[in-house]
Amino acid sequence: MEWAMVANSKYAVGAPCWVDVTTSGTEMARSFYPGVFGWVAGDADEAFGGYFQFFHHGKPVAGVAPNYGGANTPDAWSVYLNSADAAATIAKSNEHGGAVAVEAMQVGELGTMAVIVDPSGATVGIWSPIEFDGLDADGESGSPVWFELHTNAFHEMVHFYRDVFSWETEFMNGDDEFHYSVVQGGDGGVAGIY
């Protein structure tokens, strides 16, 4: 299947294109991830609330956002899916039972981000690039390479992501205890639903 491409992006519509971690321990993250993956931490940008990026071989691989939500907001990683229009993707998500966690907002001249909650309660980010495409080291050792949704509503979520992000999925043979579907894009799988 050929995915529809997003203007200003090497990523197709619905493809995972960025990851970041929201953490109450940004300084710990600065030492932990470089120690594990060899990443290099960039400078925190106060214009973006102290957000900073990690780089691998000089290419952006992940972001770090300070967690200002307190005890009610857990530290967590987020995956962003590529979209030509974040607001339109939110509307489509709403039509199919999703909810909005973060309304579409422009991030400087980099792009537009949003966060939705799927009907099973999982959050996923949306990224519409302007000047920043996202991951630039995909496939290299030490860079993010595989993304999964673990859900208690497997069949419903396969349909939700197909409807909202135009995912083409391939069901892998399983039994009553194991269901897995691979999101196909380009030359192979780019994500999974379990």
Image: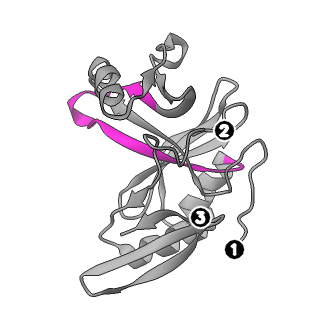
Q: Secondary structure at mark 1?
A: loop
Q: Amino acid at mark 1?
A: Met
| Quarter occupied by the N terminus | bottom right
Q: Amino acid at mark 2?
A: Asp
Query: Where in the figure is residue 134, as x and y percent of width and height?
Result: 60, 38
On the image, numbered disc 1 is attached to which residue?
Answer: 1
- State how far apart marks 2 and 1 are (Cα): 22 Å
* Residue at left offset 66%, top offset 29%: 110
Between disc 3 and disc 2, whose residue precedes?
A: 2
User: What residue occupies the far right of the structure in this picture?
Assistant: 7
Q: Is residue 44 above or below residue 99?
A: above
Q: Which mark is on residue 133?
A: 2
Q: Amino acid at mark 3?
A: Val
Query: Where in the figure is residue 45, as x and y percent of width and height?
Result: 51, 14
Label 3 neighbourhood size at 10 Å, few (<14), some (14-19), many (20+)? many
Numbered disc total: 3
- Foreground residue, 23 or 9? 9
* Residue at left offset 44%, top offset 66%: 192
Q: Secondary structure at mark 2?
A: loop
